[in-house]
Image (cartoon, rainbow, N blue to C red):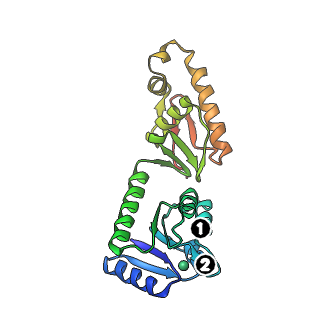
Amino acid sequence: MKVLLIEDETELRRSIRQYLQEEGHLVESANDFPSAMEKARLHAYDAMLVDITLPKGNGLDIVRALRKANNACGIIIISAKGSLDDKVLGLDLGADDYLPKPFHLPELVARLRALVRRKQAKAQDSIRVGPLRIVPDERLAEVDGTRVDLTGTEFDLLHFLAVNKGRVLSRSAILEHVWGDLAERMDRDDFLYAHIKNLRRKLAGHGCPESIKTVYGLGYRMSDPA
Ligand code: CA
């Protein structure tokens, strides 16, 4: 994996770097706040190791800036400060793990591997349609990291359309999947249309205006933007 190591202590930086390289990882490093921010913004990494106390800045500000920019890279804070406050604040800001110094290098590598595995599993469990991301287990729909506020029924409807991305779904298939037996007792077309309309309005409010298409005479289809 490709790792950015942000650490100002020369000897520690050298030993971590060497160890990770021997384990087969690609390592880039930064020794102060500005150079770390520049690398983190310009390049994509699988993981970053972030020291808190840095020349010209604080590592926690790097975590904050990356998450604010929706950078989903794995982040482990490595810090000698060891105070509970830093740990809690770091995790609150969106770091994935915290390893107090001094630590054993094999422990660091084990944490890195676990972190990347978690990230990969999470990415596979989500469905993407253009900028929209749906996480069924969490009943979460988000656009560029911002949650779309949906009712339970709207979420079920969106989920069904999204897992069938690219396919036309008939009105009756949608009604039966989302509402089950209840669907038979409804004024079907108006009912479904009202829900589709609400869902479209909410998605449009998050910058996804055209994601659910009407296929006249057939039903609805979701697809990635052209
Ligand atoms: Ca330091």
Q: Which residue is mark 1?
A: 60
Residue sitting nearer the eye, 205 or 43: 43
The residue type indicated by label 2 comes to: Phe
Mark 1 in CB contact with mark 2 (< 8 angstroms): no
Q: Quadrant of residue 18?
A: bottom left
* Furthest residue in direction top, as rendered: 185
Residue 26, percent from left and from top: 39, 78
The three-letter code of the residue at mark 1 reads Leu
Whether residue 176 is visible here, answered yes or no, is: yes
SS for tag 1?
helix
The residue shown at (57%, 38%) is 213
- Give the residue displayed 61% in from the left and 42% down from the top: 148
On screen, residue 221 above or below 112: above
Looking at the rendering, the quadrant in which ligand 1 lies is: bottom right
86 lies above or below 200: below
For the residues marked 1 and 2, what is the alpha-carbon distance in whole angstroms?
10 Å
Instruction: Determine which residue is flagged by label 2.
Output: 33
Q: Secondary structure at mark 2?
A: helix
x then y, percent, for residue 90:
55, 62
Task: Residue at 44% x, 87% y: name it.
Answer: 11
Rendered residue at 38%/65% (across/down): 111
Q: Find residue 38 and report its horizontal and vertical position in percent.
A: 60, 77
Along the viewing direction, whichever of 17 and 136 lies nearer the viewer: 17
Label 2, residues with CA under 10 Å away: few <14, some 14-19, many ≥20: many
Q: Quadrant of the N terminus?
A: bottom left
Q: Which of the two labelled residues, at mark 1 and mark 2, occupies the earlier sequence position?
A: 2
Q: Judge: label 1 CB < 8 Å from ligand 1.
A: no
| Residue 189, picture quadrant | top right
